[in-house]
Image (spheres, rainbow, N blue to C red):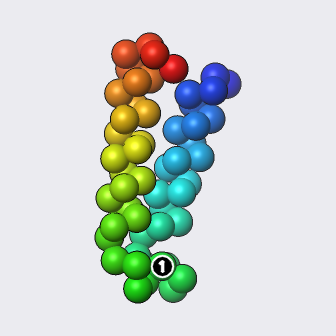
Amino acid sequence: MTLGTILLIVLILLLIGALPTWGHSRSWGYGPTGGLGLVVLIVVVLLVMGKI
């Protein structure tokens, strides 16, 4: 597995953990999910372009 794939998997797991449906993150709102979603999108674009 390449570093980019491992990074993408970790970011997706963080994104799922930050969803406001979980008890510990219910009061956070959608801010962390949006921020992590943006990071995942950037990593996917970099993977497609072959930069990672």
Q: Position of residue 8 (x, y in %)?
A: 52, 38
Q: Position of residue 45 (x, y in %)?
A: 35, 27
| Residue at x-position 40% and y-position 64% | 32
Quick check: 9 left or right of 34? right
At numbered mark 1, what does the secondary structure look like: helix, strand or loop? helix
Residue 11 drawn above or below residue 28: above
Q: Position of residue 14 (x, y in %)?
A: 54, 57
Q: Position of residue 39 (x, y in %)?
A: 40, 44
Quick check: 3 left or right of 41? right
In the rendered image, the residue lying farthest to the top is: 50
| Residue at x-position 32% and y-position 70% | 30
> What residue does disc 1 label?
25
In the rendered image, the residue lying farthest to the right is: 1
Q: Quadrant of residue 5?
A: top right
Mark 1 nearby-residue class (10 Å; few <14, some 14–19, many ≥20): some
Q: Amino acid at mark 1?
A: Ser
